[in-house]
Amino acid sequence: MPPSAPASSAADQLPARAAAVWAALDPVVAAGPALRVLDVGGGSGNFAVPLARLGHEVTVVDPSADALATLDRRAQTAGVGERVHGVQGDGDLLHEVVPAGEDDEGSYDLALCHSVLEVVDDPATTLREIARALRPGGTASVATANRAGAVLARAVAGHPVEALALLEDRDPAPVRARPARRRFAPDDLLALVAGAGLQPGSWRGVSVVADLLDMAAGDTASGADPAAVRRLELALAGSSPYRDVAAGLHVLATRP
């Protein structure tokens, strides 16, 4: 079944901070036949539900039963419950819940790995598992936190000591009970993706200004027109020096 709605209608549901990610995905998901999509760590369906509304079949693998329950409710409410499938599991153990086909080749056309590498036990293993799940020629969409953006955000928020720790790749709060979330420099992310056997394209900045606007507004809305912020995000996402200090990084990669 071909996609059933224009890509812009799905993109408009997403916050402005996701505009750059969706713009990169748009050529992959907006035209042609329905895709088999694997959303690793997709949680409550921020991308899965819009993609399903475009007619794609989406499998979400997430360790949280609560998140998967929310995913199911959202998909049913959106009328795409039959195209969204939740599976409880971990990204670095995908082979246990997403078996490969013959010759260890996967069958998914597109795999999403958004805000996952920051928290998994082994980012390299997770990316290798994702690569295995893709068919040859399939696309991986990888988005992570950007170390430079985190440094700037901590500094703007009035925490220079934490900002310096992040700059030096140290834990800004070493006494916390849980491990710190990882942040990545662009070269680090591209090397991880290539090391998993994927061919990365150019990287883009994610949320160059959207998070800063929210931070400046505090508990109140920023007052900025969301459509204008989205247009600005798209204009800045691929250009240095702006992308260099974005909150996140995004890259599309292909399985040879």
Image (cartoon, rainbow, N blue to C red):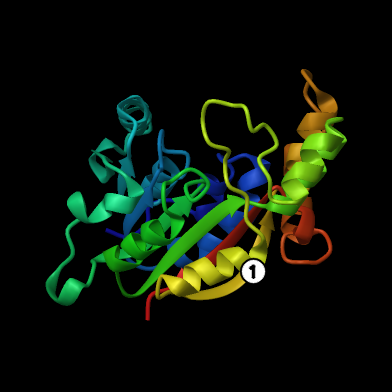
The spot of residue 201 in percent (x, y) is 56, 74
The quadrant where residue 150 appears = top right
Q: Quadrant of the C terminus?
A: bottom left
Residue 37 appears in view:
yes
Mark 1: few/some/many CA within 10 Å (<14, 14-19, 20+): few
Residue highlighted by disc 1: 187
Q: Residue furthest bottom?
A: 256
Q: Can you say whether 125 is above or below 71 in the image?
A: below
Q: Residue furthest top?
A: 219
The quadrant where residue 87 appears = top left
Q: Residue at x 38, y 68 (%)?
A: 32
Pick whichever, 52 or 1, lies toward us.
Answer: 52
The spot of residue 227 in percent (x, y) is 73, 43
Q: Residue furthest left?
A: 102
User: What kind of residue is marked 1?
Assistant: Asp
Label 1 residue SS: helix
Q: Residue at x 58, y 38 (%)?
A: 180
Residue 228 appears in view:
no
